[in-house]
């Protein structure tokens, strides 16, 4: 190799070394001040599905009985039980197998407001009346319960509201789920003609069972 060619190769190698050095020493790119970037954040929130419930409500918290239909032997006082509604917001799948519900009622003795002798709850009777039983025919009112002063209208029903007596019921909760049903009742207090005058108060408790 002549002297001129050797010089050309050395010069090319030196140039290549400088070029390689130049690539290795390049500075990183810098963002301009004030630049920004957005990130979209999403979430899907499902509606909370509360389980259905079976509930009892009463349209009022009191009823005043007034005298009507008294005889020489018996004084009678009558009134109407405020509308009682059973609401079932459950689906059929939420109802236990073979479940049935019922509303039962019982009363305390009538206490005299001025110290009169109490009147037993056996003197208070009712006659339930179904107002809205739905379309299934599976909801029905209870039987009439008469007082101890009456002859029974059904076997053994002249006991008054001393114990829990049936107001309304169904034998198949699942078949009537998802609806509401209402009932009231004729109330009657029958006391002896010589009952002491004055104000009397009793508490009628209604309970829903399933």
Image (cartoon, rainbow, N blue to C red):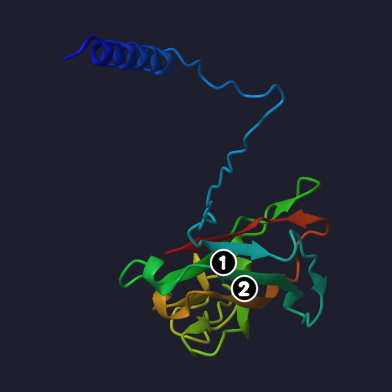
Q: Which residue is drawn at 48% across and 59% down?
A: 51
Quadrant where the C terminus is found in the figure: bottom left
Describe residue 3's horizontal placement relative to residue 55 as left or right: left
Describe residue 188's horizontal placement relative to residue 166 as left or right: right
Residue 11 image label: none
| Rendering coords of residue 173 (x, y %) | 42, 74
Q: In which quarter of the image is residue 106?
A: bottom right
Is disc 2 in contact with disc 1, using a CB cutoff of under 8 Å?
Answer: yes
Measure how far apart labels 2 and 1 are at the Cα level.
Answer: 6 Å
Q: Which of 36 and 210 is in front in this view?
A: 36
Which element carries disc 2, helix, strand or loop?
strand
Quadrant where the N terminus is found in the figure: top left
Residue 161 image label: 1
Which element carries disc 1, helix, strand or loop?
loop
Q: Name the residue under label 2.
A: 125
Q: In which quarter of the image is residue 206?
A: bottom right
| Rendering coords of residue 114 (x, y %) | 81, 46
Q: In this view, does 20 lie above or below 153?
A: above
Counting other residues with Cα less than 10 Å from the Cα at mark 1, is it few (<14), some (14-19), or many (20 or more)?
many
Q: In this view, does 202 lie above or below 174?
A: above
Q: Which residue is drawn at 78% across and 83% down?
A: 69
Q: Residue at x 49, y 90 (%)?
A: 137
């Amino acid at each position: 190799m002549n002297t001129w060619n050797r010089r050309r190769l050395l010069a090319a190698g030196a140039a290549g070394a400088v070029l390689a050095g130049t690539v290795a020493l390049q500075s990183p790119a810098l963002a301009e001040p004030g630049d920004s970037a957005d990130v979209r954040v999403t979430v899907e929130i499902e509606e909370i599905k509360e389980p259905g419930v079976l509930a009892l409500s009463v349209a009022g918290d009191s009823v005043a009985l007034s005298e009507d239909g008294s005889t020489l032997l018996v004084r009678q006082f009558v009134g109407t039980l405020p509308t009682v509604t059973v609401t079932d917001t459950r689906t059929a799948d939420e109802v236990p197998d073979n479940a049935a519900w019922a509303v039962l009622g019982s009363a305390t003795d009538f206490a005299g407001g001025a110290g009169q002798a109490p009147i037993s709850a056996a003197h208070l009777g009712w006659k339930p009346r179904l107002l809205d039983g739905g379309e299934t025919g599976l909801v029905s009112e209870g039987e009439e319960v008469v007082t101890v002063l009456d002859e029974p209208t059904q076997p053994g029903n002249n006991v008054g509201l001393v114990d829990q007596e049936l107001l309304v019921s169904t034998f198949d909760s699942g078949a009537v789920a998802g609806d509401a049903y209402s009932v009231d009742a004729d109330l009657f207090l029958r006391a002896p003609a010589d009952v002491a005058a004055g104000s009397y108060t009793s508490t009628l408790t209604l309970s829903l069972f399933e």
